[in-house]
Structures are given as C-alpha cells and as structure tokens.
Amino acid sequence: MNDLRALYEDVILDHNREPRNFQHRPEGANHEAYGFNPLCGDEFKVLLQVEDGVVTDVGFEGVGCAIAVASTSLMTEAIKGKPVEEVEALFQSVHHLLTGEGEEAAPLGKLQVLAGVHEFPMRIKCATLGWHVMKAALEDEGETVCTE
C-alpha cells in the first residue's frame, strides 16, 4: 500500500509541476468546453482536435489545484490518438474509479494511479473536473461544466 501511495504522490507531483499539453492550443481544435469547481477554484478549458473519429490533438488551459492539474494532464496523454469511442470508455472507467459510480468500460493502465484520490474524498471533484470538461467538449454541449 505504501508503494502505491508513493507512486500516486510522485505522479501527481510530476504532472502538477510539468503538466502535459498545458497551455497547448491545438491549431485545428474543433471541440472545446469550459468548466469550474467553485469549492476549490479550479477552472479549465479543454480543446480537442477530432478528425475521422479520432482525437488527434488535445490541450488545456486554466488554473487548478495539484490534483486537478495532474488528472487533466494524465487525461490529455491518455486520450491523444485514441478513437472517440475509446475516449468515452476511458471517461467511464475513470469516473467509476474515482466515484464508484457506473462500470469500468476500458482498462485504465497508468491512469489506475488516480485511485489514490480515494484517500481524499473532498478532492474527487478536483480529479474529475478535466474529464467532465473533455466529455462536454466531445459532445459539443456548449454549456459550462460545474462540479456542483
């Protein structure tokens, strides 16, 4: 258990210090959404370039706590180059991992490290924010995502 916690902490710290695809605006972005967590002050915009049913590029911008930034950074790495159907399945699996709701729809691989958020129940909304914003972008909802 200590090894998993140490890995969780290392990954969160690494992705918070050097978030992947942060401040990256895909040149051909054709999907985007904005969301915020009023309790924590996290707010992100996720930009996606989707071509022929595949997420070919992704970026995000905004501000957030370490867990929100790290989870969104991990998300961008996980979805880039994946078909939309796989991205939606990953969303379901991560949502299940973090909240216990729904079912695992896809293997999580290194995203399994997010299981460490369970030790901090108040941070679950932080960890899911970027994922919900990404899902809204894919679905072109056009409404602001709010975790409350």
Image: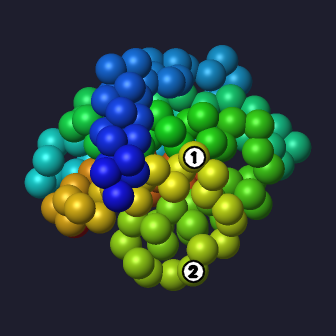
Residue reaching furthest front? 2
Looking at the rendered structure, the secondary structure element under dot 2 is: loop
Q: Nearer the viewer, residue 66 or 25?
A: 66
Looking at the rendered structure, the secondary structure element under dot 1 is: helix
Checking the image for residue 1, the label placed there is none
What is the spatial separation of the Cα atoms under label 2 and label 1, in whole angstroms? 18 Å
**Disc 2 packing (10 Å; few <14; some 14–19; many ≥20):** few
| Residue 109 position (above or below residue 98) | above
Amino acid carrying mark 2 in the image: Glu
Image coordinates for residue 118, horizontal then vertical, percent: 29, 64
Q: Return the disc, 2 or 1, that comes first in the chain's sequence.
A: 2
Residue name at image x 63 percent, y 52 percent: 109
- The residue pinned by badge 1 equals 110
Image coordinates for residue 66, horizontal then vertical, percent: 26, 35
Residue name at image x 76 percent, y 37 percent: 81
Checking the image for residue 103, the label placed there is 2
Image coordinates for residue 97, horizontal then vertical, percent: 46, 68
Amino acid carrying mark 1 in the image: Lys
